[in-house]
Image (tube, rainbow, N blue to C red):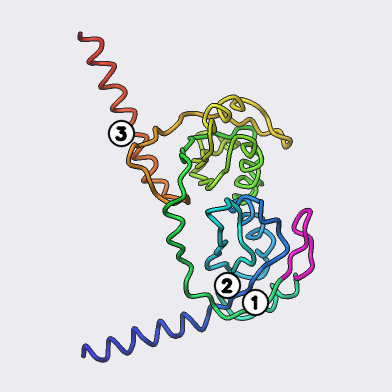
Amino acid sequence: MEESSVKVQESLELNCRKSISTISVEGYDTSLHGYPLKLALRKHFASCGKIASMFVPRDFKRGILKSPLFIDFWGEGARDKALELSGSDVGRWNVVVKAVPRQEDYYDPAGFNFFRGERELVVKVYDLPSSVRKIDVQIGLCKHFSSCGEVTCVTVLVHGIFVHQRNTIISIMGEGCVEKAQQLSGQCNTDGWNIVVDSVVPLSADKRKPTGCEHPSIVLERIKKAKMEKERKMKNKTSE
């Protein structure tokens, strides 16, 4: 019985691997930031099929990206559709697409030594047309805060109380990134969205992790704990 279960599991894993195809992408400026590049490519290849994963290698010593990057697609025909887009414009650069074997080793241990003070901002976006897609919200916020530092993740949460409001969490890093972001709070971007920095998640002393997206529930829990700690300190100060 146990042997049968193992065989079924192995069969499922094999079928899963067979359903994934991989392409390499070149042509981008390696001085670009990784997350905005990923968003641009997700939008560009959206018509090809579901993207399973995307890996953008990075030269952590020099602080730039490496080329090529790799994209895994789910489903048959996705890679062929992606190959047809080779040479197309992604926005000031032309994408070069090649079919490659699936890249098994995405892990780069050097990334864990790369830390420049990542912070999370809780941002509310108002005056946003309901027709705007999630990917366009992410790209728009990346552009809005690009002058503040390196945006490494934009998590779009559930809609706010009003139809034309979106709540988001933005991960950003770089010297003075929080202060610069707060200066942009309340300003409208070129599309007329009113973007407000609602709060900033405190940076923990032991936060030494590689940059990337966290599940929204984790970030919200951190915000909740930070507010409770602030209220506790205020209460103690009042009672003294």
Q: Earlier in the sequence, mark 1 or mark 2?
A: 2
Q: Quadrant of the C terminus?
A: top left
Contact, CB < 8 Å: mark 1 with mark 2?
A: yes
Q: Is 215 positioned to the left or the right of 239 in the image?
A: right
Q: Which residue is mark 3?
A: 225
Q: Is 119 positioned to the left or the right of 59 in the image?
A: left
Residues rendered magenta in the picture: 86-96
Contact, CB < 8 Å: mark 1 with mark 3?
A: no
Q: Which residue is mark 1?
A: 79
Q: Which residue is mark 2?
A: 73
Q: Which mark is residue 163?
A: none
Question: Compared to 48, does 134 lie above or below?
Answer: above
Q: Amino acid at mark 3?
A: Lys
Q: Amino acid at mark 1?
A: Arg
Residue 76 on image: x %, y %: 60, 81
Q: Residue at x 25, y 16 (%)?
A: 235
Question: Compared to 62, does 86 lie above or below?
Answer: below
Instruction: Judge whether residue 91 is colored magenta.
Output: yes
